[in-house]
Image (tube, rainbow, N blue to C red):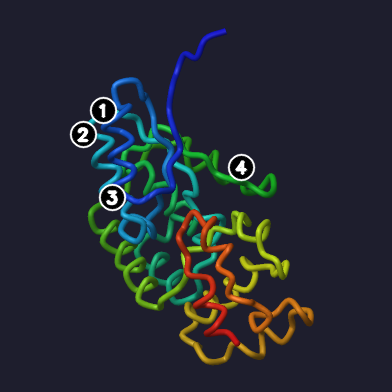
Amino acid sequence: MSIKNIGFSCHSGFDDFKRFIDTFGDIIEFCQLQVNWFDWTYQDAKRKCEFLKEKGIALWVMEPVRGGKLAVIGDRYTEILKAQRPDLSVPAWCFRFEQTIGATMVLSGMSNMQQLTENLDTFSTFAPLSDADLSTVLGIADDMQNTNMAPCTSCRYCTSVCPKELDIPKIIGIYNENCFAGASGTYSRYTARLDEGKRPGDCIACRACEGICPQGIKVSEIMGKLK
């Protein structure tokens, strides 16, 4: 048995990403990256994609909808997208974005038959976003980032090392929902619904989760804000 196609998946920053390709780029055929319209600038995905194109390495995409986070973005942002393109659902914006940037493979998680059908319908045509569409969706990304939300994708690596067994993605979800809504400072009424012993105040700031988080989230700082 032999390996016919060699590629790699990467969550690192640009410098490590570039160093790996500079070292092994002559045998690499594809790279799988977390790329979506939110992370285009937030995770430096644009620069990584441009470097792959320069090296002639195919782009494979993971997290096109950011673990579902970009499928439900709040009424204010949804209304902006609907006004721009009434024909596109919010998830479809994510997939048209991948077509726009030249992804050769898109790995999308789906939870039910309806999502599968909708995704197949979207990808049955090649219809990249226009310049105006890109400006709109990237403008929303900029606005979202100004809310100081955390880039959690609910991979749950953090929960495997937390000595207090906190549901860190769920807690960060509470933080992010409040950031989206512009309601910072009202966390307590939501965190109080969590089980005793499993609330932000129970975090001991050991930072074990931060050492394993692919997104580099400063979890202990967020927990401190939620206490």
Mark closest to the chain's N terminus, 1 or 4:
1
Mark closest to the chain's N terminus, 4 or 2:
2
Please give the label number shown on residue 117: 4
Judging depth in this view, the residue of 33 and 10 nearest the camera is 10
Circle 1 or circle 4, nearest the eye? 1
User: How many angstroms separate mark 1 from mark 3 (CA)?
Assistant: 15 Å
Under mark 2, the amino acid is Glu
Disc 2 crowd, CA 10 A, few/some/many (<14, 14-19, 20+): few
The residue identified by callout 3 is 46
User: How many angstroms separate mark 4 from mark 2 (CA)?
Assistant: 35 Å
Instruction: Tell me the SS state at disc 2.
Output: helix
The residue identified by callout 2 is 54
The residue identified by callout 1 is 56
Left or right of residue 212: residue 167: right
Residue at the farthest right position: 196
Under mark 4, the amino acid is Thr
Judging depth in this view, the residue of 126 and 26 nearest the camera is 26
* Circles 1 and 4 in contact, beta carbons < 8 Å: no
Tell me the residue at 68%/56% (across/down).
160
Residue at the farthest left position: 54
Quarter assignment of residue 207 = bottom right
Q: Quadrant of the N terminus?
A: top right
Under mark 1, the amino acid is Gly
User: How many angstroms separate mark 1 from mark 4 (CA)?
Assistant: 32 Å
Q: Point out residue 77 in the picture as x, y percentages from the top left corner.
A: 43, 72
Q: Quadrant of the C terminus?
A: bottom right
* Circles 1 and 2 in contact, beta carbons < 8 Å: yes
